[in-house]
Amino acid sequence: MRNIWIACVLILGSIQLHAQDDLMAMLEKEDAKQTNYTLATFKASRLINGQTVETIAKQHLNFWISHRFGAINSGFIDNFLGLDEARIRLGLEYAITDRLLVGAGRSTIEKTYDSYVKYKMIRQSNKMPVTVTAYGSIASNTMKTGYTMESGTVMRFNNNLQRQTFMGQVLIARKFSDKLSLQVMPTLFHNNLAENVYMENTQAAMGFGGRYKLSNRLSVSAEYYYNLIDKEEYEEAAGQKYPYHNSLAIGFDIETGGHVFQLHVTNSRGMIEKHFIGQTIGTWQNGDLFYGFNMARTFSFEPKIKK
């Protein structure tokens, strides 16, 4: 009799385990049917100088303050390692939807006004390996005609159309883990007026960027833009060295509630694509480095729910 009871218990146990396995398999199949989107690939909508695939929540407003000091190698006595100089960009961006935002800003470099649109087309999920965001901007140089650029070129405008620069990017990113996110940024921009007759009005570049989380509130980030200009062809035609270099920036992101604070070092002083992709004068090899910060404060305009 005892053996019969033991056999019944074993049979019931195997039936229960088999039922649990079937239930788990059904749940896994059900989860596979649902789309689970990846969140927070990056901490902010801006990586360092350039953009990330991130947008902001609907009816939210970001106020950006970007600041760059002078070159570190500009001297301690004369320039206090660059702290005596400053370049600033103030910007606002507003989310029309969770995936679409518009923005505008003003930089002290060339007294430039910029405006842009950003749309998250594809979101990374259990069914999609990457997030893809489209980004386009217009920049307007408002300097008086005849001013001298950092490269030494004297710029003269015949009309306001020549002051415009148009830029387009496709931002492609993947969050590989809770800590690591990487992004590529194919870029095309067009200056209505080239700096000289040897420079192309339309230029292309490829950007690479990423961040690694050190803690819940601290991460290290980097970005690099490779300008696809044929520098040898330019130097042969112009009889002079190409004046600009590729942009490299390294920094830290600190998240504090409604603020994102970014500290970084870069060889680019500009804070919009026209400047840091197309007009970077400094090089890391020569110590032409600028330290600075970005700070973003987010405001919500969502209607308050009455209790």
Image (cartoon, rainbow, N blue to C red):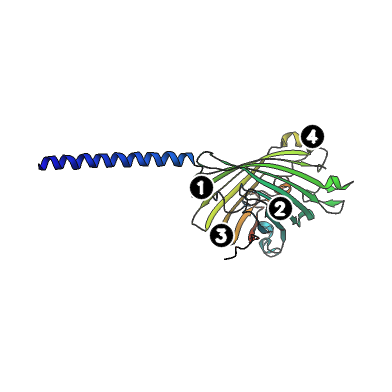
**What secondary structure is marked by label 3?**
strand
Identify the residue at image location x=49%, y=50%.
179
229, 141: nearer the viewer: 141
**For residue 299, what is the image quadrant?**
bottom right
In the rendered image, the quadrant that contains the C terminus is bottom right
Q: Earlier in the sequence, mark 1 or mark 2?
A: 2
Q: Position of residue 303 (x, y in %)?
A: 64, 61
Q: Is residue 289 above or below residue 225?
A: below
Q: Residues within 10 Å of mark 1 (few under 14, many from 20)?
A: some
Q: Report which residue position mark 1 lands on.
A: 180
Which mark is in front, 2 or 4? 2
Tell me, yes or no, if residue 33 can be seen here: yes
Q: Name the amino acid type tagged 3.
A: Glu
User: Gap between marks 1 and 4, in whole Å?
Assistant: 44 Å
| Disc assigned to residue 237 | 4
Q: Position of residue 251 (x, y in %)?
A: 58, 54
**What secondary structure is marked by label 4?**
helix
Q: Residues within 10 Å of mark 4 (few under 14, many from 20)?
A: few
User: Gap between marks 3 and 2, in whole Å?
Assistant: 21 Å
Kindly indicate whether the residue at mark 2 contacts the one at mark 3 (C-beta within 8 angstroms): no
Kindly indicate whether the residue at mark 2 contacts the one at mark 1 (C-beta within 8 angstroms): no
150, 183: nearer the viewer: 183
Q: Report which residue position mark 2 lands on.
A: 103
Q: Earlier in the sequence, mark 1 or mark 4?
A: 1
Q: Position of residue 202 (x, y in %)?
A: 76, 38
